[in-house]
């Protein structure tokens, strides 16, 4: 991607820290906590993903129902065993009923295994679809979305948040359905055995519900804050790992450790608060459960003494109380996982709800069969922030085959022109034409496939040299890849690599020099064979001798193609057809090299200053060499 390095909100600070410290690009690590969205809406959207496997879910729920019903039969049979066999001392009947109970529990265990086995597949399939949709969505979002978020924070949503959803689906979906069956079945059995004891045991339930509701409402917000803090920490780690050279050059290791400690401590504080409040639920439920048992046993003992019920009924009833309270306790103990999953799902759906880089169907009507390369800017005004324009009424025309050089100080707006030509951003005022058509009438993929871009900051993939070059045109043959490398003067160093073209590069081409990476990027652009070339400081990272070879190859490549060249080294653009001198977002001078020198204006001053610096540097090198 191409970005203008300007002091605007749309600008992305590469390293090491954005405004306000780590994570500054999106509000800072101590940004106000966002309130969670509608939980019901989030659960409904998750159900949309789950419902794609309705048949398997139906089978899972059948096994859940089977195992739950079999579990519910156990306490009833135990009560019957006490009243009908243990107290009358009928050991033969007791033996048979014990075998029957064992068989029931064995079948329940088999059902539990099958439901868990099937649910693992359901959850992984669901989460896989969710992660796929999230990744696909990221490919459709405009650059302004990525400008405002760190890579680490987005990675956190793709990994941590989605994994939280996966872990919850693996356990909580089955648990919720099973809990519903157990609660309903236990309550029915309790009413059947003793309506009086049922009323006694239910006295505690409203208090349980009230406490759980109050605590979960608070912990939901805490878990959202925890997920946000985790994303901030991941963003900081990603930036520091990417910028290790800068850290070591400026010896900022201690500062990074302090910043990491601060981020880590913030995550720790938020996590402790969330876990502590969630941890209150379990002990509170245990206290209330024990109180319920005490009441039931006391009242039940009185009823047995008075002859209104039997010992077996009391034993069964106490077991059903445990069955009734167990789902409540399980939900209480899983609150942290449920809340974390809801927060994670909300963060994922937040990305899915972002407006994509869609085409305007009313404007997108043209599919150019062959781009000739005429580019016209008409009174174009644009700013990354509306109140801070970067370009102001910029107008120029590039005829097919012409070389247009963009010159000016850093932040003048040169790269912004390239951003707009590539439709990375949309203009606010004015018009940009390609072969007579407004860019908004041309589909982005058609437009961008006609562009070849070589940036100052080259990005290479962790793949072979050959495949990195082939990225410019995926259907290119090996011979075409090698021809492009020769044209870019890259083959000489490629053949010296351990495996030549098959040498696998490390992340971002870390096992190559900056100049070598630049040559591969140029070879990639050559292979794409575009109608319009964009060279953004394409030769700034190579030595003078290599630059001469590249310039020669570029002259051949640019022949017959419209080319836009951004260069601070003015000696590289002397042969351009037109030079546009840009300052403060405006074109202040235009013409070829000789014409601009004759006017003795801004370009003349800039060129003369560079010429004097280069001459002074050359003289200094000669003096040092003479002394040696």
Image: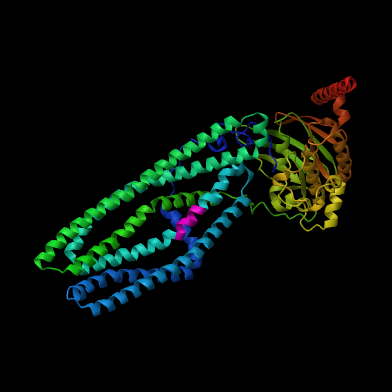
- Expressed as whole percent of the image width and height from the top left, the position of residue 159 reads 55, 51
Does 528 sit left or right of 240 as displayed?
right
- Can the viewer see residue 222 in this picture? yes
Q: Residue at x 82, y 44 (%)?
A: 562
Q: Main secondary structure of the magenta part?
A: helix
- Expressed as whole percent of the image width and height from the top left, the position of residue 602 reads 79, 24
- Expressed as whole percent of the image width and height from the top left, the position of residue 7 reads 64, 31
559 and 236: which is toward the camera: 236
Rendered view: 153 above or below 100: above
Quadrant in which residue 246 is drawn: top right
128 and 609: which is toward the camera: 128
406 and 492: which is toward the camera: 492
Which corner quadrant holds the C terminus? top right
Seen as rendered, the residue at the extreme left is 306
Rendered view: 243 above or below 56: above
Q: Is residue 168 magenta?
A: yes
Report the span colored magenta.
163-170
- Expressed as whole percent of the image width and height from the top left, the position of residue 452 reads 78, 47
Rendered view: 312 above or below 405: below
Which corner quadrant holds the N terminus? top right
**Number of numbered labels in the structure image:** 0
290 and 6: which is toward the camera: 290
What colour scheme does the image use?
rainbow
Does 53 sit left or right of 288 as displayed?
right
Q: Is residue 9 magenta?
A: no
- Can the viewer see residue 431 in this picture? no
């Amino acid at each position: 991607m191409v970005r203008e390095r300007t002091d605007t909100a749309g600008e992305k600070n590469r390293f090491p820290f954005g405004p306000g410290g780590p994570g500054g690009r999106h509000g800072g690590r101590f940004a106000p906590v966002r309130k969670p969205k509608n939980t019901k809406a989030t659960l409904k959207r998750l159900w949309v993903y789950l419902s794609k496997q309705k048949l398997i879910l139906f089978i899972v729920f059948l096994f859940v129902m089977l195992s739950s019903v079999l579990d519910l039969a156990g306490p009833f049979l135990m009560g019957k065993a006490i009243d009908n066999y243990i107290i009358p001392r009928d050991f033969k009947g007791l033996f048979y009923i014990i075998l029957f109970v064992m068989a029931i529990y064995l079948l329940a265990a088999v059902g539990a295994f099958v439901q868990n086995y099937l649910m693992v597949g359901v959850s992984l399939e669901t989460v896989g679809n969710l992660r796929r949709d999230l990744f696909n969505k990221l490919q459709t979002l405009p650059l302004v979305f990525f400008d405002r978020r760190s890579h680490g924070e987005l990675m956190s949503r793709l990994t941590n948040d989605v994994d939280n959803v996966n872990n919850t689906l693996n356990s909580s979906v089955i648990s919720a359905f099973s809990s519903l069956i157990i609660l309903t079945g236990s309550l029915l059995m309790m009413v059947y055995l003793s309506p009086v004891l049922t009323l006694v045991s239910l006295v505690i339930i409203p208090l349980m519900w009230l406490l759980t509701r109050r605590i979960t409402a608070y912990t939901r917000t805490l878990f959202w804050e925890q997920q946000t803090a985790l994303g901030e920490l991941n963003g900081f780690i990603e930036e520091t790992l990417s910028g290790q050279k800068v850290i070591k050059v400026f010896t900022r290791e201690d500062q990074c450790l302090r910043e990491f400690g601060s981020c880590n401590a913030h995550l720790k504080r938020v996590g402790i608060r969330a876990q502590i409040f969630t941890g209150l639920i379990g002990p509170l439920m245990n206290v209330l459960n024990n109180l319920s048992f005490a009441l039931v046993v006391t009242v039940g003992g009185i009823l047995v003494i008075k002859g209104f019920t039997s010992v077996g009924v009391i034993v069964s009833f106490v077991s059903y109380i445990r069955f009734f309270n167990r789902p409540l306790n399980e939900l209480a103990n899983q609150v942290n996982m449920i809340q974390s999953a809801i927060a994670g799902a909300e963060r994922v759906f937040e990305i899915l709800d972002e407006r994509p880089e869609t085409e305007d169907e009313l404007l997108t009507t043209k599919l150019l069969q062959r781009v000739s390369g005429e580019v016209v800017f008409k009174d174009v005004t644009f700013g990354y922030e509306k109140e801070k324009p970067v370009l102001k009424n910029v107008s120029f025309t590039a005829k097919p085959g012409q070389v247009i050089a963009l010159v000016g100080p850093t932040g003048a707006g040169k790269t912004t022109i390239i951003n707009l030509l590539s439709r990375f951003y949309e203009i606010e005022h004015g018009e940009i034409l390609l072969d007579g058509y407004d860019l908004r009438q041309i589909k982005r993929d058609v437009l961008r496939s006609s562009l070849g871009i070589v940036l100052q900051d080259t990005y290479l993939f962790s793949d072979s040299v050959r495949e990195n070059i082939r990225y410019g045109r995926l259907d290119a043959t090996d011979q075409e890849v090698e021809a492009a490398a020769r044209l870019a003067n890259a083959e000489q160093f490629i053949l010296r690599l351990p495996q030549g073209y098959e040498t696998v590069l490390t992340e971002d081409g870390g096992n190559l020099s900056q100049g070598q990476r630049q040559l591969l990027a140029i070879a990639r652009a050559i292979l794409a064979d575009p109608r319009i070339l964009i060279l953004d400081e394409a030769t700034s990272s190579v030595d003078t001798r290599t630059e001469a070879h590249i310039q020669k190859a570029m002259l051949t490549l640019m022949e017959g193609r419209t080319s836009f060249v951004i260069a601070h080294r003015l000696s590289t653009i002397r042969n351009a057809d037109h030079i546009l001198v840009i300052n403060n977002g405006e074109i202040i001078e235009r013409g070829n090299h000789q014409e601009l020198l004759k006017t003795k204006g801004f370009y003349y001053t800039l060129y003369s200053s560079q010429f004097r610096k280069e001459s002074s540097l050359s003289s200094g090198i000669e003096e040092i060499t003479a002394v040696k």
